[in-house]
Image (tube, rainbow, N blue to C red):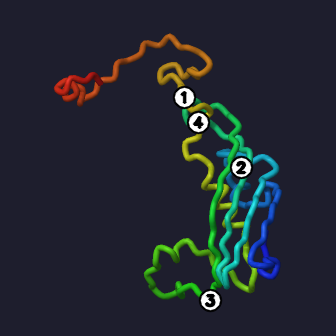
Amino acid sequence: MQLELKHIRGGELEQEYSCHPKEFPGLVLLTGVGDSVYRDPVLVKLRFVQSGRLIEVSGYVQATLDLICGCCLSPFTFDLAEEFALSFVPESTLPDLTTEVELETDELALIPYREDRLELLVPVQEQLLMAVPMHPLCLDDCKGLCPDCGVDLNKTACHCEKKVFNSKFGDLAHLKGREV
């Protein structure tokens, strides 16, 4: 997935891509370990705005994933939709990174391009990966698994004895007149 700068006529261009998840090596790697499986297709909408040699890209990614809930370990479907912004600059304008240089905050987010061609695969893939929740939940109020018998508390009520949590700070809460 790439774009030549000559296609940005009048300083603006909008592109829409419908991609197979196998086109992104990082997504294929995640599928291999079973953490998340991206379903076909992955929709990518990009708007390019050129200002001199700086290219600002505002984007939107949309995909459907199969995930495992972090609480009850049940598989579920997650609809991913995320907006993002990227900034591309010519490689020649960035500091030489072979020597030790302190980068400014605004320089850290710049993506270099060369030969008047934007390589979009890696930056878009990064957005797809960062949009996946670190602790996915099948439901906002997922009850998880019983710590004693292991039953899914979303589907079945268990009859295990609920142990009272003994907080070492419980006595301090009583000093202020609160229960823990």
- The spot of residue 27 in percent (x, y) is 71, 55
The residue that disc 1 covers is 141
Q: Name the residue under label 2.
A: 31
Q: Residues within 10 Å of mark 3 (few under 14, many from 20)?
A: few
Q: In this view, does 148 lie to the left or right of 80?
A: left
Q: Nearer the N terminus, badge 2 or badge 4?
A: 2
Task: Pinpoint residue 152: horizontal percent, then vertical percent.
Answer: 58, 22
**Is residue 124 or residue 7 the one in the foreground?**
7
Which of the labelled discs sits on residue 137, or is there none?
4
How many angstroms separate mark 3 from mark 1 (CA)?
51 Å
Question: Which of label 2 and label 4 is nearer to you?
Answer: 4
Front of the two marks 4 and 1: 1
Q: Which amino acid does label 3 sit on?
A: Ser
Q: Earlier along the polypeptide chain: callout 2 or callout 3?
A: 2
| 142 sits to left or right of 58 | left
Q: In which quarter of the image is residue 169?
A: top left
- Residue 84 locus on image (x, y percent): 63, 60
Q: What residue type is labelled 2?
A: Thr
Q: Is residue 158 above or below residue 124?
A: above
Find the distance from the CA under tag 2 to the CA under tag 4.
Answer: 18 Å
Q: Local crowd at mark 1 within 10 Å, few (<14), some, or many (≥20)? A: few
Disc 2 is placed on an element classified as helix
Q: In the image, is residue 93 above or below residue 73?
A: below
**Residue highlighted by disc 3:** 92
| Residue type, label 1 | Asp
Using the image as rendered, state which of residue 66 and residue 49 is in the foreground.
Answer: 49
Q: What separation in Å lies between label 4 and label 3 (alpha carbons)?
A: 44 Å
Q: Which residue is drawn at 60% across and 32% down?
A: 73
Question: Closer to the observer: label 2 or label 3?
Answer: 3
